Amino acid sequence: MRSFITPAAAKNGLSGSRPVVVLFGATMFLSALLLFWVQLIIAKMLLPRLGGTPAVWTTCMLFFQMLLLAGYSYVLVTTKWMGDRKQAILHIVLLLLSVIYLLLASGSVASISERNNPALWLFVYLLTAIGLPTFIISTTSPLLQKWFTRTSHAAASDPYFLFAVSNAGSLLALVSYPLILEPALSLSNQNRLWKGLYVAFLVLAAGCVVVLWKSMKTEVAVIQESTNGSPALPQRLYWILLAFIPASLLFGVTNYITTEIAPTPLLWTIPLALYLVTFVLAFAGRHLIPVRFSGVALGGLALLLTLVLAANATEPTSAIVLVHLCFFFVAATICHNKLAAGRPSAAHLAGFYLCVAIGGMLGGLFNTLMAPITFNSIVEYPLVIVLACLVQVEDIREGSRVDHMFDLIWPVGIGVLSVVLAFLVEGSELSPVVAVAIAFGAPLVIINHRFRNRPVRFALALGAVMLASVVYSEMQNRTLHAERNFFGTLSVRLDPETSTRVLFHGNTIHGRQFIADAYQREPLSYFHREGPLGQIFDAFNSNAASPNVAVVGLGTGSMACYSFPGQHWTFYEINPAVISIAQTPAYFSYLQKCAAGSLDVVLGDARLQLQNAPDRHYGLIVLDAFNSDAIPIHLMTQEAIALYTSKLATGGMLAFHISNRSLKLDTVLADVAKRTGATCLSLADGEHNALIGKDPSEWLVMAQHSPAFDALAQNPRWRVVQPGNGSHAWTDDFSNILSVLRWY
């Protein structure tokens, strides 16, 4: 594309000045920041009302992706069918309507009820609460870049650097929300700040319209002459592919490292930050990784990552996570650099960004909707790793027919070799490290030395090794059952060392049971009779305010071992797969063998379902939803505790399982208790005894005037938890995850 500036434009200099770049850049930066913030704010606002069901997250994700596509499509259609003047008038009308929209829109979620279709009502709520402003923000990046080409700035013919500015705004939003906004402001104040910044965005956007209008009025325009026609379909599909791979890898690596390796709060922000950084660098023309070195780096990291995945390695945690993140960064950099290098002339800018948005949406849908239904484990992540290696292929047609045939034959041979070696080392006296090195290291050495110059063969051979590792993993883990849904991956594994069957969610243990029939009525793991929970039930059963017990979180159902005749127990469980596993005697038989009284299992989010329970009904409510590092915050706010308390009989008690590798939750609960006039006791039991099936655990009890609580208080091992600053107690309107992180 060539650009020509009219003499009037050069003389006037209206839109070629530095302030115009600042204006357009600031508008795009602020729009991206607002778009990112609103997603975090609205999701946190909805959580207490609708609970942690998949419908909430998938509907929110689909809503924002659909609006983003709608915004990009709007720019494409109006650019094609309208002149600049009509497009500017239409956008001014939309900007004015959005002001009225914000004034009239209600932020209340009272109309949404779990009795209705939650996905439908949530979508309607999102549309009425933030639909038009979000749509306008989503149009900003492609629209302003298109308008910038109408100016006489030196960079007008190639406005894609502004896309880097936009992603920088998203990056700032990502970093600032958990570090600044969430700790300092309540949700209501965050909402007010967002609306104030949105007004500032409207002013800046109006300024961009004025610049465009004056440019047309004074004939300050860039006459664009495209030397090429519209991009062909293969080119558009290639753009979609290049956007799909990093987006899918983002979801894949985040899901893998936060469930299978280190379920640490806020760890998800690191992959997303790297994703945004690669976008910024690519479209700013900065090559952090030299182009000639990027392919070598990707291949080396792919080999190392394949070995890590094949070995199912999780230790040392920091090093393993670093390997995953390094591969993701290099792969995303390569894809985004190819996108930036293959960008079309400014005349086809809107279509290019629509393809990028479609690729990103498909990546999200593949990982969050399709994969959990299709695969029992996180298969999509290795698949896209292979695809990221295949994208290095410049021309799939290169080579003879024989070469292409061997591109398939060799990977099959490598896969067979890996399986054979895995069977040979299984059951040997070799250490696990040596066994993995032989089974998968040898094939990877062959791949490295023989296939590095054949990208297709290289990528498919890596995939074959990963597939072979599944066989080895099945033999090593002795997996009895594995399934996956929107809540994550669940597996039941046989542990021959302790003679137990163990329930895992990712790599987090959620309960175990002895195989021997004589010991199957003994609660194990965090629920052992010799642990804190055993003492809690001893105190409760001796001083029961009511014979009814509620348990939030079913797990293996081991707590049923504490039930007595005449008691009624209700388990609340959000994950239907957990219920199915706990009710299958071939895996766990606690519910069948230990339930002394009547027992019900209620499916659904506990906070929503407990609202249906009679007031003053339970003598004890046990919350076992905090032993994973990804805690459900909406279950431990002041409003949630008030709900639990209303369901307690006089003299009743709350018990919280707060074992956590990354968070210290006792002070949070003590702060809430202080506001309600309750007191907290806690016991951190660090004893681990594999022979009797006991794992370390930490428990907290909360009560007002409870005989059972008083009985525990007489035990010197139970300590009174002193609240911190009660004014910062967590509520549905305020929480601060950083304040409870363990920094050691």
Image: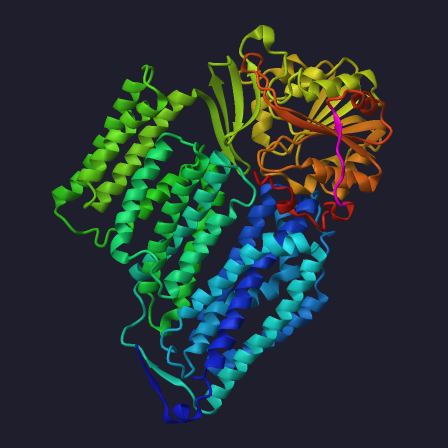
Q: Quadrant of residue 636?
A: top right
Q: Residue lying farthest top?
A: 518
The residue sitting at 25% across, 34% down in the picture is: 444
Residue drawn where x is 74% and y is 21% of the image: 536
Q: Which is more toward the observer, 207 or 318? A: 318
x, y (%) of residue 334?
A: 33, 54
Q: Is residue 26 above or below residue 251?
A: below
Magenta stretch containing residue 344, yes or no?
no
x, y percent for residue 311: 36, 29
Please indicate, yes or no, whether residue 390 appears anywhere in the rendered image: no
Say whether residue 212 is left or right of residue 517. left
Q: Quadrant of the C terminus?
A: top right
Q: Which residues are magenta?
A: 718-725
Q: Is residue 579 left or right of residue 456?
A: right
**Residue at coordinates 19% horizontally, 35% vertically from top-left?**
409
Q: Residue at x 42, y 63 (%)?
A: 354
Q: Main secondary structure of the magenta part?
A: loop
**Front-most of residues 426 and 267:** 267
